[in-house]
Image (tube, grey):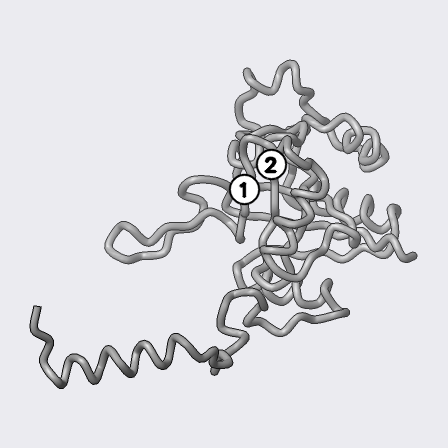
Amino acid sequence: MNVSPAKENILKRVRNALSQSVQLPFPNAEGNNSVFQTAHDGLEMKFAEEFSKLQGKFIFCSGKSELLENLQALAEHKNWSQVLCQTPSLMKFLAPAGLSFLNADNAHIASGFQAAITDCEYLVARTGSIIMSAAQPSGRALPVYTPVHVVIAYTHQLVFDVKDGIAKMKDKYGAKLPSMINFATGPSRTADIEKTLVVGIHGPREVYVFLLDEEK
């Protein structure tokens, strides 16, 4: 096969280039490093800022008594008579707030309930997201059953980025990752109908995060 002088010249230059290693012009462009600046402190403030932008309600609590007082005040303001909760440890922890919980046995036949209270796996500060999984006692469906979802979280559950949350999940569960890992970012919303934003269309209209400071 005859090769034109111009093509041969190009192939020669390619062969010469391949025979000599050249340093990558952009060594950080391989996806090994985050493109976002990691904050080493103030994750609470970052999460509160991003979560609030998404119409989430954030309540920072310096201790258990403050959390119970704030939750009780919210329940009274909203006139909650019954609240869904399927996490026994949470029901015991929140018992002093005086809430009337539906237990896991009769939650499936409940009607007219106003709120669900769950725990979470982690909180992602950069995106204001809540990480939940099927391994939690609340399961897959409870956080989307009710018009209001209340999350009780602790400061040690804060991570900066989504990849940090995924790494934490892998460390926690190893090879037995939950069958569902969900990233909830603010109340449910859609703009499918005439490009008009509707909140609460596929899940809760309101999402509250009560963050308990374990340093205090």
**Which residue is rendered at x = 75% and y = 52% of the image?**
211
Camera-nearest residue between 52 and 19: 19
**Which residue is rendered at x = 58% and y = 53% of the image?**
129
**Which residue is rendered at x = 58% and y = 48% of the image?**
207
Camera-nearest residue between 13 and 203: 13
Using the rendered view, name the quadrant where residue 61 is placed. bottom right
Residue sticking out furthest to the front: 1
Residue 56 in the image: x percent, y percent? 58, 55
**Which residue is rendered at x = 55% and y = 30% of the image?**
179
Camera-nearest residue between 98 and 198: 198
Q: Secondary structure at mark 2?
A: strand
- Residue assigned mark 2: 133
Q: Kindly check if marks 1 and 2 are in contact, taking CB atoms under 8 A apart as contact.
A: yes
**60 left or right of 113 in image:** right
Residue 34 in the image: x percent, y percent? 58, 68
Dot 2 surroundings within 10 Å: few (below 14), some, or many (20 or more)? many
Q: The disc labelled 1 sits on which kind of residue?
A: Asn
**163 left or right of 44 in image:** left
Q: Quadrant of the N terminus?
A: bottom left
Q: Quadrant of the C terminus?
A: bottom right
> Does 87 sit above or below residue 129?
above
**165 left or right of 40 in image:** left
Label 1 – label 2 distance at C-alpha: 6 Å
